[in-house]
Amino acid sequence: MGYSQLAWERAAAAVAARALREVPFYRERHARGRGLAPVPTEELEGRLWALCPLSRPYRAMTEPTLWTGDPADLAAAVRGCGAGGGAVVEVRSAVVPWDRLGPLGPRYAPVLSPTATAVDVSASDGPARALVAGGRTVLVSAPEDVDAVQGRIGAVTVVVRRLAKVGEPGCLAVLHDRHLGYFATRPTSCGQWHLLWRRFHVAPGDGGVLVTALKRRRPTLVRVAVDVGLRQVAECSVHGTPVLQA
């Protein structure tokens, strides 16, 4: 189904209403009169138990942190920037047990960032090196880590840079936040920051944008305020889907 502004807004409203009904974090804010006011990311720290529905609470003793992200978001971001069709290697601060980005997604391997807390950050590079040796591979990395990681795993066909802020034009890029994950992508063919609108709703806010995760319930993330240097939501004249603009 193609993009519809009305359907997009309705999807975000449905997630917000469910959050107020089912999720302690938003129920507490509503009781204090804050309702669906923008949520600064610092309010999310240490509140994992409160960000999950009452019917599926977070159990810290039996499951990993919920900030590991959703592999389907990364798969959508890589496709969106035009770098799909190969395996994906992602630079992370901690490894994850994924070998694919979803049941039908591309093959995947994590590698530790050079700044990760580890005795030897290259100790787990074997799967990534095997993917690179096997064919077309996309590296998703912060710009400052690209050279060091390619020195460990080999040269990749395409580099997708993971940016916390808007960076230089002309490169394949994705927008990433530690709590939200990957929510926008910039293909060189278009040059605009396209939202992953099937997975996220974004609205303008004071000092940044307000992001709602449409597909995720653990954690539930509604109107999370982030500053990526882009504050307006418009519609791409070429593709007819939402984009972020300065």
Image: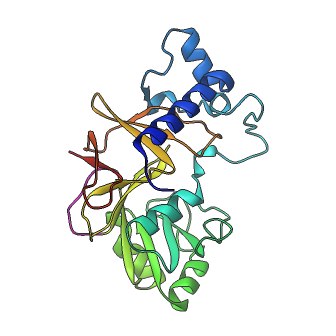
Give the residue furthest to the top. Answer: 32
Where is residue 21 drawn, in percent x and y? 66, 22
Asked if the stretch drawn in magenta spans residue 165, the answer is yes
Left or right of 189, for residue 83: right
In the depicted view, which residue is nearer to us: 62 or 194? 194
Where is residue 228 drawn, in percent x and y? 30, 45
Left or right of 57, for residue 200: left
184 vs 217: above or below = below
- What is the chief secondary structure element of the magenta stretch? loop
Number of numbered markers? 0
The colour style of the image is rainbow
**Residue sitting at 37 percent across and 62 percent down?**
142
111 vs 22: above or below = below
Where is residue 206 drawn, in percent x and y? 28, 27
Asked if the stretch drawn in magenta spans residue 190, the answer is no
**Residue sitting at 40 percent across and 42 percent down?**
5
In the depicted view, which residue is nearer to us: 99 or 81? 81
Q: Which residues are magenta?
A: 164-171
Left or right of 24, for residue 146: left
